Amino acid sequence: MYFCGNGYIYMSKLKERWGVNSNFQVVLIIVVFSLNGSFATYIAKPVTALFGLNSETSNPWMFWPVRILLVFLIYQFTLPIVGYLFGQFKFFSKFSKKTLSRMGFKRFFKES
């Protein structure tokens, strides 16, 4: 089967790696990743403002590390929520736990 050059091979590898059964699930997962990235960036702006930081008035050496950290944390915590809206909660819940565990937050999750 030929699908956009090597697209079929990539889809097969993603299905195997992520443990999903259909190309539609892979597309949903990719859509969730991209939408959640935009959502996390959008939400980080008012949260950054809550800390009194603004890109125009704050020192860039303070503003951007705080903003990037906030985007990352918001992304990890909203990923299962956005995944739920697309019917992929189980995948994204496991994905977020795995990512946060690797970053040292393992003690906050129950062993399963």
Image (tube, helix red, strand yellow):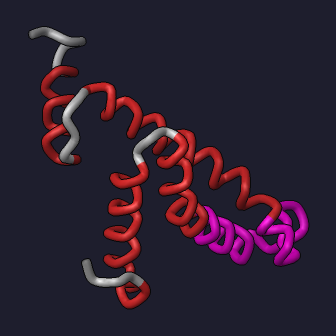
Residue under the image location 39 percent in, 39 percent down: 29
Residue under the image location 13 percent in, 9 percent down: 2
- Closer to us: 1 or 66: 1
Residue 59 horizontal/vertical position (percent): 79, 74
Quadrant of the rendered image containing residue 58:
bottom right
Residue 97 horizontal/vertical position (percent): 37, 70
- Dividing the image into 4 quarters, which one contains the N terminus? top left
Q: Is residue 62 left or right of residue 69?
A: right
- Closer to us: 58 or 95: 95
Quadrant of the rendered image containing residue 110:
bottom left
Residue under the image location 36 percent in, 54 percent down: 90
Residue 92 horizontal/vertical position (percent): 40, 55
Give the vertical position of 3 relative to 70 (above or below): above
Residue 105 horizontal/vertical position (percent): 41, 84
Is residue 45 rendered magenta in the image?
Answer: no
Residue under the image location 23 percent in, 29 percent down: 22
Among all residues in the image, which is located at the extreme left? 1
Is residue 66 rendered magenta in the image?
Answer: yes
Give the vertical position of 5 relative to 45 (above or below): above
Q: Is residue 95 left or right of residue 14?
A: right
Residues drawn in magenta: 47-71
Give the vertical position of 89 relative to 96 (above or below): above
Q: How many marks?
A: 0
